[in-house]
Image (tube, helix red, strand yellow):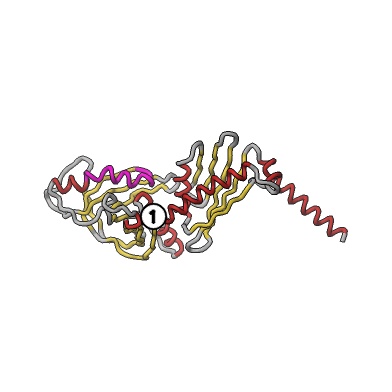
Amino acid sequence: MKKLYIFLAILVIAGIVWYLFVYPHDYLVTIHAKANAGTINQTIKLWDSTLDSTELSTTDNLQHLSQVLHFNDSTHIYEWNISEVNDSVSKIKIFAKDSAHSFINKIKIPFTDTDFEKRTKNTLSDFNEKLHEHLRNIRVKVVGEDTIDATYYAYITVKTSQFGKAGAMMKNFPLLDPYLVNNGAQLNGKPFIEVTQWDIEKDSIEYNFCYPIIKSDSLPRHPELKYGQRAAKKALKAIYNGNYITSDRAWYSLLDYADKNNIAVTGLPVEIFYNNPNMVSDELNWKAEIFMPLKE
């Protein structure tokens, strides 16, 4: 019996030493959300951009982010880890640490609510509210394999961030619809974008902003305007409802679907837009078809 008590005492002491001197974090917050890692990753980045005095480090691994938050009297470090619980739910673990007061926090947290703990709870509660508000305002439904129709189109090449995609479309829209119509072109479908480059780590994209038209020998000329032909191609398809600023949430859903079903895709989505945002006030009624072309 004495040996058992000694063994248990050693375990307790070892646990305390590990917790105080080895464990790299002071506090853990866990959040569950009905969203994939890509959507959560993008929401963290958008939320971070609204905060003062923060630094966010990312990689092409969507599941991990590091964040430094500077408050008046301290610097907090958050390590974000996103994991899948099932096909619709993800778990977000945020490991928090006060860089200057870690040791004293570890001693106090089991026995009292420290200022660090309160601030961490309040900060991450704000994120949790923003995340779930965003999820209430979008819908993504993966349909499965389909075909992108062939079309002839006029287009403008755009380089921007993922978040800046819709703003760049609005800026360039007058050169497509009014200019084409006013100069004799006949429109032949809904506007769309075809992404030609996507840097997932940097959230930067290059895309062609396109308008289907009837091909003719007398199309208008403009230094920024080009013409192209798209052949019909097989692709995975999703339906997105919500603000077009965040329609890239469907990109991640299609990538997840492709990965789970061992389908090789290009990773370069095509989006077809069905609504004029100026004419439809309820964003959940905005519709876009999102395609992820299959590799040939």
Q: Is residue 38 visible?
A: no
- The local secondary structure at tag 1 comes to loop
The residue tagged 1 is 267
Q: Residue furthest right?
A: 2
Task: Return the x and y of residue 15 as percentages of the image width and height.
Answer: 74, 51
Q: In the rendered view, would you say 72 is above or below 279?
A: above
Task: Return the x and y of residue 200 as percentages of the image width and height.
Answer: 43, 48
Please identify the quadrant where the C terminus is shown. Answer: bottom left
Answer whether residue 189 is magenta in the image: no
Q: Specify the principal SS of the magenta part.
A: helix
Please identify the quadrant where the N terminus is shown. Answer: bottom right
Q: Quadrant of residue 102?
A: top right
Residue at 35% across, 60% down = 239
Q: Quadrant of residue 75?
A: top right
Q: Amino acid at mark 1?
A: Gly
Q: Is residue 242 visible?
A: yes
In the image, 212 versus 132, the foreground residue is 132
Answer whether residue 163 is magenta in the image: yes
In the image, 31 versus 230, the foreground residue is 31
Task: Return the x and y of residue 43 as percentages of the image width and height.
Answer: 45, 49
Q: How many marks?
A: 1
**Which region of the structure is painted magenta?**
160-175
Residues packed near mark 1 inside 10 Å, few (<14), some (14 to 19) or many (20 plus): many
Task: Return the x and y of residue 207 as percentages of the image width and height.
Answer: 32, 48
Locate residue 182 relative to residue 62 in the image: left or right: left
Residue at 35% across, 65% down = 145
Q: Quadrant of residue 30?
A: bottom right
